[in-house]
Image (tube, rainbow, N blue to C red):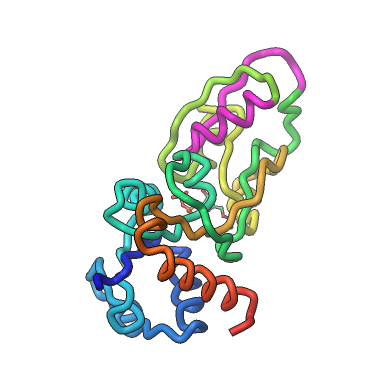
Amino acid sequence: MKPLRIALTKGRLEKDTVALFEKIGFDCTALKNKGRKLILPVGGHQFEVVLAKAADVITYVEHGVCDLGIVGKDTILEMGNSFYEVLDLGFGKCKFALAGPKGTDFFGGYSAKTIASKYPNVARNFFESKGMDVRIIKIEGSVELAPLLGLSDAIVDIVETGSTLKENGLEVIETICDVSARLIVNAASLKLRKAEIEDLAEKMDRAKEGKL
Ligand code: PRP
């Protein structure tokens, strides 16, 4: 049987995923000594981990070239979900928030506001739910720069410790929702390899709860 292929978001979620796999008892030696390799065996050859950027994790799972994915809810909310989200992994916790320069009355006044975000769909949905018409500008990173440079009135972004906002004179205006890492599964894989996938998800769930 081919190994189950798991797309894993590079960076912040990597370390917690390795810790969770090791709690289950999966050998992560190759993943921990990966060098520049992008596809690594985990748990002997039971699994194959593919390291990718968050948005690409979703693309690979949606297209079925990876059976499973580990990705933040932020990216899921931004990209939509034509896959199954089977488990909240309980790490990678942060929040989506609307933030702006300290002390500004964002909701006061009638002029249309400009919002910068790496997550234009999340921002659009948030303001639509409020019945507010805003202009949204997509920024690729360090979104906090946009209000500082006068490009936008506020930002919709991820807040983890809050220090990036604080050190740049910004503050949360409103919290939008909680974010954490999720285990996602390709729809066909879930049918074809149901038992293996359910077994893995159950082990991850138990390890996360400290029950292993
Ligand atoms: C994220 C986010 C904020 C920062 C928040 O950026 O966009 O800038 O982390 O974290 P904090 O509340 O702990 O300060 P990231 O580091 O992922 O980089 P990016 O801005 O290049 O996307």
Please provide percent x and percent y for residue 74.
53, 47
Q: Residue at x 63, y 82 (%)?
A: 211
User: In the image, 190: left or right of 37?
Assistant: right
**At 58% across and 60% down in the image, what residue appears?**
88
Residue 123 is situated, as x and y percent measured from the top left of the image, at 57, 32
Left-right relation of 136 to 129: left
Q: In the rendered view of the protein, which quadrant contains the N terminus? A: bottom left
The quadrant of the image that shows the C terminus is bottom right
In the image, farthest residue toward the top: 110
Seen in the picture, residue 76 relative to 8 is either above or below; the reply is: above
Q: Nearer the viewer, residue 133 or 114?
A: 133
Quadrant of residue 30 within the rendered picture: bottom left
Residue 54, position as x, y percentages in the image: 40, 52
Q: Which residues are magenta?
A: 108-129
Q: Nearer the viewer, residue 195 or 104?
A: 195
Task: Out of 32 and 3, give the one closest to the viewer.
Answer: 3
Give the total of numbered labels.
0
Q: Quadrant of residue 70?
A: bottom left
> x%, y% of residue 41?
28, 76
User: In the shown orientation, is residue 120 left or right of residue 179?
Assistant: left
In the image, residue 24 above or below residue 66: below
Taking the spot 44% from the left edge, 40% from the top edge, the residue there is 79
Q: Is residue 154 magenta?
A: no
Residue at image position (27%, 73%) is: 40
Asked where in the image residue 196 lies, by quadrant, the reply is bottom left
Is the residue 169 above or below the residue 17 in the image? above
